[in-house]
Amino acid sequence: MNYTSTRSVVESGILTALMIVFAMIGLSVPMLGFFGSILVPMTIAVVGVRHGFRWSILSVVSAVIAIAFLLGPLTALIEGGVFGVIGILIGYGLRKQWSVSRLLIFPAIVLMLAVVVQFWASAWVMNLDPAQMWTSLGEQLEETMRDMYVNQGLSEEQIGVAMDSLQDQLSIMKKVLVAGLFCSGIAISYIINYLTRLVLGRIGTYEIPEIPTIQGWRIPDWALHIFLVGLISYFVKQYVPFLEYIGYNLMYLGGIMLFIRGISCIWRISKSYTSSRLVRWIVLAIFIAMSQSAAIFGALDVLLHLEDKWKRRSE
């Protein structure tokens, strides 16, 4: 066995052990579950970039076997299988110089499909119809929120208003589930890619795609078209009922894209006005808190090219 193979075995073993630790922490401490879902695929991606596709697969298989012995095969398949596949995909994509859009979209699709499969599998195990399971989850959430409101000392009238608002939110959430899962997958993919590149930058020099920060986020003009098509679909739902769901999802997706365009445009404009990062973050935080305002700003930038106008003015 030559030096390179020995190093690959040692480093892959160490990173696989880290993956198992991250997975165990995420599964054992619910509050840290999100961090586990980020760190597990990031570790596998690092293995894939440094040592290749084969070693990343071997690391996932080893981790799945170890987790199966510790926590059971089902948990191992969910944690190691789903997030391991995402890590393999990101590592392969970075090594093969995929575009940023592919690095974000492909893992997001895998994650979205995994959530859907997991939901249907859970419904099958519990012998429930998926619609009944969704209703059951909603009822559990409503009961939990009602108990929380009671403990906070709210009056019955205030609790009633809050519960009505919660039911409306759950109804909308059900309608935008596809777009919501996809956007969440994109966000998680971005974090994993960014952290993977950060880690690789600390331990060596690799020719991998640049993951843009907020300064470099560029959302195309057709984001507004997606939103408008969704809006039109929503208003004609009385003639074609299923268009309501399409309309909600397109409006949600287009709205998120316009929001991202808005805050990135605001960041670049504020950077031109001031060199203080603190001031820029305060301005950005205000617009993020007023998410609709940021989305409107993004739409106005599509129509009026606000950033270009400001640049001409500054010159």
Image: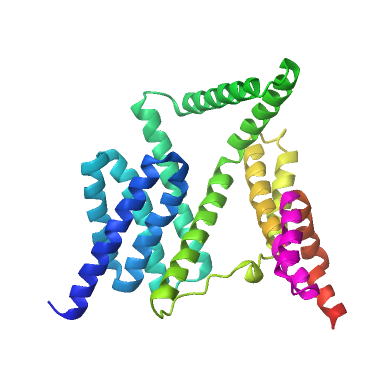
Q: Which corner quadrant of the image does residue 287 belong to?
A: bottom right
Q: Which residues are magenta?
A: 262-291
Q: Point out the image quarter for the N terminus.
A: bottom left
Coloring basis for residues: rainbow
| Location of residue 297 in the rendering, given as x and y in whole percent from the top left corner | 79, 58
Residue 263 in the magenta stretch? The answer is yes
| Location of residue 201 in the rendering, given as x and y in whole percent from the top left corner | 44, 75
Is the magenta region chiefly helix, strand or loop? helix
The residue at the point 45 percent across, 57 percent down is 107
Looking at this view, is 201 or 207 the one in front? 201
Residue found farthest to the left: 1
Q: Is residue 210 left or right of residue 46?
A: right
The residue at the point 63 percent across, 45 percent down is 249
Q: From the viewer's perspective, is residue 104 above or below residue 63? A: below
The residue at the point 36 percent across, 23 percent down is 127
Residue found farthest to the bottom: 315
Looking at this view, is 237 or 71 the one in front? 71
The residue at the point 83 percent across, 74 percent down is 310
| Location of residue 142 in the rendering, given as x and y in whole percent from the top left corner | 59, 24
Q: Is residue 195 left or right of residue 158?
A: left
| Location of residue 91 in the rendering, given as x and y in whole percent from the top left corner | 38, 66
Q: From the viewer's perspective, is residue 32 above or below residue 205? A: above
Q: From the viewer's perspective, is residue 52 above or below residue 43? A: below
Residue 62 in the magenta stretch? The answer is no
Tell me if residue 305 can be seen.
Answer: no
